[in-house]
Amino acid sequence: MENRSQPLSSGLRESATFNRHVIHEIQRAAQTGIYDIRGWGAKRSLPHFDDLVFLGASMSRYPLEGYREKCETGVILGNRFASKPLHLDIPVTIAGMSFGSLSGSAKEALGRGASEVGTSTTTGDGGMTDEERAHSKMLVYQYLPSRYGMNPHDLRRADAIEIVLGQGAKPGGGGMLLGQKISDRVAGMRTLPAGIDQRSACRHPDWTGPDDLEIKIQELREITDWEKPIYIKVGASRTFYDVTLAVKSGADVVVLDGMQGGTGATQDVFIEHVGIPTLPALRQAVEALSELGMHRKVQLIVSGGIRNGADVAKALAMGADAVSIGTAALIALGCNSPQYDAEYQKLGSAAGFYDDYQDGKDPAGITTQDPELAARLDPVEGGHRLANYLRVLTMEAQTIARACGKSHVHNLEPEDLAALTIESAAMAGVPIAGTDWIPGKRGGF
Amino acid sequence: MSTFDLSKISVRELNQHLHQLSEVNDIDILEPRGAHAVACGLTAPLNVSIRGPVGYYCAGMNERATVTVHGNAGTGVAENMMSGEVRVLGNASQSAGATAHGGLLVIQGDASARCGISLKGASIVVGGSVGHMSAFMAQAGTLVICGDAGDALGDSIYEARIYLRGQVASLGADCIEKEMRPEHLAELTQLLTTAGIHADPTIFRRYGSGRSLYHFHSDQASAY
């Protein structure tokens, strides 16, 4: 029998253009007549933080002693206009993910984990639950085009408001939550019939363009008596202009989500082909803030493919004030855990590959509304795992910052970075290692 | 009766004062001059009269208060209203009553595009006509239109109800005319009476969701 894992040994040659995945997708499309909808973020290989390295201190720079000298990690978010900015202990926050897309126990676990280490978590497209509020020391309330569950009471009990214009996985696209996840409670919160395939709008219903947005922000500030920081979240595409307009609209904080950022349910073609990677988007965002003289005054949170402390440190070195994690947080809770591999296999997937968040059959009890599956996730235990992971991210970032001689992770700077590829050098705006060459800069080509 | 003159104080000062009130109060607001976010975020059963035109988001997210605009209203009047009553004696711009969950919005004149967009339970009564894309993705609640409706009325509507007296330029995706049963006539009669608009409810037609787009299916692709 042919060994499918080693086709070359039998002389078979796989097409680079029509590889097995492509062939499978054509066959699936022909069979079903509908596009593939899935969760997760872009799975294609993209220039990313892995293509950057730090220039640790040596003769020309002094490092800090790893276990002796302090390296601060605190972040203040939203002190441009809000009277009550957020004070985070670590520069890692939890990204917006809805109750509906996630189970109640998962939302509780995210709140518990974030609170344990002094950072914030975020609601999603579906409103705020009492459990989420109760277990989140700092909770950011998303203000989305759908306005599902939006009400002034929750607006006032939030710690910050995040106006969502886009998402890295689908800039320009609205949300969707398929019928199998629209339980009675989810339907009630969204004022929708239970069991239908829910579509969220891609544009806000009562404003268009940055001039209107400025007035919308004024309204939200008036309703909340100018207490809450107002974030604006954009999916990475025309990032320089989007960030410029967000600042001009009056944002306290800009949240930038690269195309590696996750989603609960989106068309595969959208995830893989719309938007730009986190790396170039981050550079453009910092350039926009700097050009306006607002870098570090309007804070920048970046998300989309943050996995470890090195990613955190590189994002901060490029100019972010904090990062946000979604997919990694779910993995920390137990998503794609090997303990459920047999069940993933029954669903046609495997541990490490599972992305069918839209189906609501998640064996780990995270991306589901099935009460029996959701009960598998102990929110206390899950929260503790998330807190552990967040601590590791922070310690790793501190380790790198100390090696670069920084007493605060925010003191990391582009000068501490070198690129390993031409693409990453051009996108991140840092020189290729061993050179002073940045493609497109200083007369480069 | 308390009077506030917006030519002398800021919108911030006005709203801050209104937010501190918890009991019934009569409020008169003078010289609004198209200011934005006037009387938004109210939570007390106030009777607020605004003597002139207002800008965007007047009475936004209103709870319990009764707000009357003696003039025209800009974009998003009574957006996301939870309860209470907002009455515009003139015309209203785009997105009037957008995403409103409860309460009653009465517009005695015309309303522009997207009136009642993403409506979530409130009642809107428009004495005149409404612009295009009104009741787009409206989920619950009622939109009464005593005049005509523009293009794509009720596009992708969920469970909201539309009552229309005049003509509709075109219906949006999955919006269909439905039978006017006695309970609908009773609801419409009640709404017109409460709104204080004199119109014969028996000549209205009802529109709502055909519910054919509630689940994704490739056969429906041409509907979008």
Image (tube, rainbow, N blue to C red):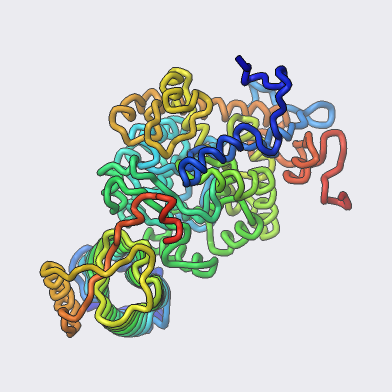
Tell me where residue A286 appears, x and y as whole percent.
Answer: 67, 51
Q: Residue shown at 42%/34% (left/top)? A: A110
Q: In this picture, is A88 found above or below A443?
A: above
Residue B121 placement: quadrant? bottom left
The quarter in which the N terminus of chain B is drawn is: bottom left
* Residue A120 relative to residue A406: left or right: left
Nearer to us in this view, A396 or A235: A235
- Residue B180, above or below A438: below
Can I make out residue B43 in this image? no
Res A383 seen here = yes
Could you tell me which residue is drawn at 45 percent across and 65 percent down? A216
In screen coordinates, is A300 left or right of B146? right
Question: Which one is nearer the viewer's eye here, B12 or B93?
Answer: B93
Residue A221: x, y in percent? Answer: 42, 61
x, y percent for residue B220: 41, 56
A336 horizontally vs B25: left or right = right
Q: Residue at position x 43%, y 30% from top? A: A113
In percent of width and height, residue B58 lies at 36, 72
Residue at the farthest front position: A1
Query: Quarter of the image containing the C terminus of chain B?
Result: bottom left
